[in-house]
Amino acid sequence: MMHRRRFLQHSALAASALALGTVFPGPLRPRRNLKLGFDNFSVRALGWKAPQLLDYAASLGVDAILFSDLDVYEDLSDAYLQRIKAQADGLGIEIHAGTGSICPTSGAFSDRWGTAEEHLALTIRVARALGSPVARCYLGTMADRQGDGGIERHMESTVAVCRALRRRALDAGVTIAIENHAGDMQAHELVTLIEMAGTDYVGATLDSGNATWTLEDPMHNLEILGPYAASTGIRDSMVWTTDEGARVQWTAVGEGLIDWAAYADRFETLCPDVPFLLEIISGFARPFPYLADDFWAGYEQVPAHVFAGFVRLARQGHAIEGFRPDAANPEAAQQTYQQAELERSLRYCKDVLGMGLKP
């Protein structure tokens, strides 16, 4: 009951977020048979734990949720995880479980959960206890493309960790779902990693937003990663040209450059059984000064046709403003902003794209 009381304390925030949303028309086509949900990182400013997030997900009428970090749980005991699973089952919500970097050579890796192998083993145990079909994780960030060996060195390290946990993942019935994360790997590089490790127990967490951080058009990213997808992290992107190259700002779904009707059609064809999980991260832009010679260190192997697709995308876009929280109460402003961005995106997916199995 305690987590329900804490949830109700935030009801005013939820109401204000809904008030900021847009009312969309009915579906443009018959409803798609796709599960719809979100990543808890979308509302990270709220600091909610798993029980509160499940109540929130139920209030939004979604089918699934990705708990993308281990801190979302109040403890990692089997008894606690069984209670979380029972709550999710009672609400009719599918859980995808996840964590951060499992690459021991990446600058993003932390030994907080032990070695890389121990960290991945823990995540697989959590996933199994929650009934999650995946253990979502990632290699690192775009910084890992720099230095000796480039991204390939870290890909090999990640493959070695996965191979060490192959039998455990198979016995648990859990797919190690590696995300294209924060500009670390392009789609074809992640596919190479997955095939090196073994497609019988390793798949992809397909992230449409992170595609633009690797100089990719998200539609191209979907075509390559879709057949390997086991989980997702979906958001829109606005990309525009600058004197130095381009800038990327992630947005709510329907407010960037992706043709979502076409994207949803291909998603339904390529990965029909994978939940469409929104990871809305918006409000700031990142520069990609690709006209500078020193930018290309670490990107030497980027295929020309992939980069050309990114440039075409940038030429279609325009500059947009970032989010500036109220200086008087920035924490509350971030909370309201993140909820509004997520809830507007969910409504777009339901009302315009016809996604979700629940009303």
Image (spheres, grey):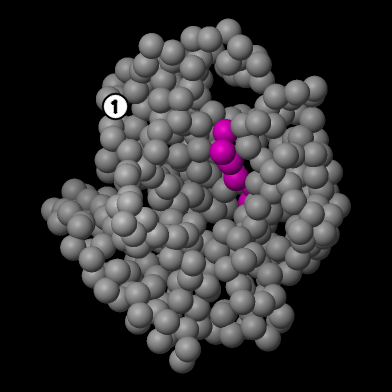
Residue 112 visible to an observer of this rendering: yes
Left-right relation of 122 to 19:
right
What is the quadrant of the C terminus in the image? bottom left
The answer to if 286 sits in the magenta stretch is no
Res 36 quadrant in image = bottom left
Q: Find residue 107 and report its horizontal and vertical position in percent.
A: 72, 39
Give coordinates of residue 108: x percent, y percent.
69, 43
Q: Circle 1 sits on which residue?
A: 319
Q: Is residue 62 left or right of residue 230?
A: left
Tell me if residue 38 comes above or below residue 184 in the rendering: below
Mark 1 residue element: loop
- The amino acid on which the numbered mark 1 sits, given as a three-letter code, is Ala
Image location of residue 137, percent across then percent down: 65, 52
Q: Is residue 50 above or below residue 262?
A: below
Name the residue rendered at 71%, 80% in the picture. Answer: 77
Seen from the viewer's position, the closer of residues 320 and 343 is: 320
For the image shown, how many numbered marks are present on the structure? 1
Q: Tell me which residue sits at (40%, 70%) in the image.
A: 57
Q: Which residues are magenta?
A: 177-183
Is 129 or 268 nearer to us in this picture? 129
Furthest toward the bottom, the residue is: 1
Question: Taking the image as drawn, is residue 223 in sight?
Answer: no
Above or below residue 217? Residue 35 is below
Q: Residue furthest front?
A: 328
